[in-house]
């Protein structure tokens, strides 16, 4: 993975195939910017980093990718361009899916307006700070200040810096020109590694060199299109970071902050439990009606719906149950086959065999008149409910003020719909 700086020569001479390679043009799959972001994503996944800051975050794509990681608890983006932050902040807002399937742990996403060469104590002590295609935008004065701020003051456990490899540039149609009009410089591998090793030595970090954007066949000597340095703090010599109140420096302007829904939050736990309870109860009720009233089954399935049967249902009204049938339902539940147990009772996420067994062996739903009842003990058997509620009492606490319970409080009740509901 690492590249030794003594193993290459910084030269534009690639060999006899260079001109042919240049004329063909360079295409990366996936695109180079995605390769850079996926590199960081894999690193976060490998090290389970909780606090990550992206300096020069731009359109927040990297933060958007990282927020899916369950280990992330704080994601911070910093950029000097407030118009870019304003345009792209919506992609970081929690979605409806984040409400339905909340995270286990709290995640806060924060954006600041500020420069990578300004000190702000809120960025001290992070697990990882990324600087993706950033340093080449710094003028000489800011580049000189950059190590002091990022390595010395912020002092994270890891730092990832990516920057263009100028040795790759002759392969592009523009030749040796800088890749962006705002770039102040672009280094070859020797220049980047010399700078990186000096910074690492000064601030007690080790550094490993790699990159993304493989060169095409015939141009292997130029190295990666994007060169990357991974800096790791030398823990043996590192001292615990302590920040007193007088050391606080809040230079950055807070632009955006959002706390994602998580199971650490009481209102989120209640929402998840209620949503799952209603979902499973109505799925079970639907299956009961399909089994007990074949006519209702055809009306539930619109593809099979026959206008004559709809009219018949309107005339007959809701399904009626004999005393014998009601007794059978109360004792045994409907006669599910093994296939039906999986297809109808266990609709939803994939369950383990143990979870399936627990659900199937729990008390069965039953009917009282035209009311469909599901024992709370059965609802508690569903993993999504059981994960949050450790007892029947806890389940009652979350649902009692919203659902209708039986007189003894042991089951949830819903009406069996009449013909007007089909």
Image (cartoon, rainbow, N blue to C red):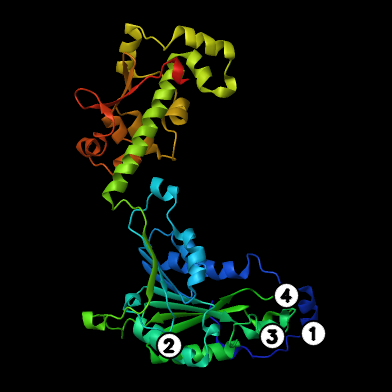
- In this rendered view, identify the residue nearer to me: 45 or 136: 136
Q: Going from the N terminus, do you reach mark 2 or mark 3 first?
A: 2
Q: Secondary structure at mark 2?
A: helix
Q: Going from the N terminus, do you reach mark 4 or mark 2 first?
A: 2
- Cα–Cα gap, marks 4 and 1: 12 Å
The answer to the question of whether label 2 and label 3 lie on touching residues, with beta carbons closer than 8 A, is: no
The answer to the question of whether label 3 and label 4 lie on touching residues, with beta carbons closer than 8 A, is: no
Where residue 8 sits in the image (x, y, percent)?
Answer: 62, 88
Where residue 238 sits in the image (x, y, percent)?
Answer: 31, 83
Q: Secondary structure at mark 3?
A: loop
Q: Going from the N terminus, do you reach mark 2 or mark 1 first?
A: 1
- In this rendered view, identify the residue nearer to me: 337 or 284: 284
- What crowding class fits label 1: few (fewer than 14 Cα within 10 Å), some (14-19), or many (20 or more)? few
Quadrant assignment, res 27:
bottom right
Q: Report the disc number at residue 147.
A: 2
The answer to the question of whether label 4 and label 1 lie on touching residues, with beta carbons closer than 8 A, is: no
Examine the rendered structure and indicate whether residue 36 appears above or below residue 118.
Answer: above
- Cα–Cα gap, marks 3 and 4: 22 Å
- What crowding class fits label 2: few (fewer than 14 Cα within 10 Å), some (14-19), or many (20 or more)? many
Closer to viewer: mark 2 or mark 1:
2
Q: Secondary structure at mark 4?
A: loop
Where residue 381 sits in the image (x, y, percent)?
Answer: 31, 35
Q: Residue at x 32, y 47 (%)?
A: 268
Query: What residue would you read off at disc 1?
Result: 16
- Cα–Cα gap, marks 3 and 1: 22 Å
Closer to viewer: mark 3 or mark 4:
3
- Cα–Cα gap, marks 2 and 3: 27 Å
Q: Residue at x 34, y 15 (%)?
A: 370
Query: What residue would you read off at disc 3?
Result: 177
- Cα–Cα gap, marks 4 and 2: 36 Å
Query: What residue would you read off at disc 4?
Result: 217
- What crowding class fits label 3: few (fewer than 14 Cα within 10 Å), some (14-19), or many (20 or more)? few
């Amino acid at each position: 993975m690492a590249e030794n700086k003594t193993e290459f020569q910084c030269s534009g001479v690639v060999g006899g195939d260079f001109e042919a390679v240049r004329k063909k043009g360079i295409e990366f799959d996936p695109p180079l910017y995605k390769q850079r972001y996926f590199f960081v994503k894999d690193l976060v996944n490998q090290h389970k980093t909780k606090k990550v800051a992206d300096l020069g975050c731009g359109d927040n794509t990297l933060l958007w990718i990282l927020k899916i990681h369950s280990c992330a608890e704080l994601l911070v983006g910093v950029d000097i361009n407030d118009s870019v932050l304003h345009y792209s902040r919506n992609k970081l807002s929690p979605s409806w899916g984040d409400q339905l399937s909340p995270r286990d742990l709290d995640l806060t996403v924060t954006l600041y307006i500020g420069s990578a060469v300004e000190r702000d104590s809120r960025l001290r002590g992070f697990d990882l700070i990324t600087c993706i295609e950033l340093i080449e935008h710094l003028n000489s004065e800011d580049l000189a200040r950059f190590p002091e701020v990022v390595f010395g003051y912020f002092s994270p456990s890891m730092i990832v810096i990516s920057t263009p490899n100028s040795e790759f540039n002759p392969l592009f149609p523009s030749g040796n020109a800088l890749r962006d009009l705002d770039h102040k410089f672009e280094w070859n591998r020797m220049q980047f590694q010399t700078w990186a090793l000096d910074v690492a030595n000064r601030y007690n970090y080790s550094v490993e060199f790699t990159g993304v954007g493989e060169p095409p066949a015939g141009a292997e000597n130029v190295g990666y299109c994007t060169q990357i340095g991974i800096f790791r703090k030398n823990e043996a010599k590192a001292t615990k970071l302590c920040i007193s109140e007088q050391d606080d420096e809040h230079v950055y302007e807070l632009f955006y902050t959002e706390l994602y829904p998580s199971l650490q939050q009481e209102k989120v736990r209640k929402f998840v439990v209620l949503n799952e309870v209603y979902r499973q109860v109505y799925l079970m009720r639907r299956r009961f009606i399909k089994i007990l009233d074949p006519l209702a089954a055809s009306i539930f399935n619109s593809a099979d719906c026959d206008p004559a049967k709809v009219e018949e249902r309107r005339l007959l009204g809701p399904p009626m149950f004999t005393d014998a049938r009601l007794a059978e339902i109360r004792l045994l539940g409907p006669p599910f086959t093994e296939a039906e147990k999986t297809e109808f009772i266990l609709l939803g996420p994939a369950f383990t065999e143990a979870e399936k067994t627990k659900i199937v062996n729990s008390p069965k739903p039953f009917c009282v008149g035209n009311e469909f009842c599901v024992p709370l003990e059965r609802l508690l058997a569903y993993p999504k409910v059981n994960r949050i509620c450790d007892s029947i009492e806890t389940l009652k606490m979350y649902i009692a003020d919203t659902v209708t319970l039986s007189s003894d409080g042991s089951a949830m009740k819903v009406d069996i719909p009449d013909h007007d509901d089909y």
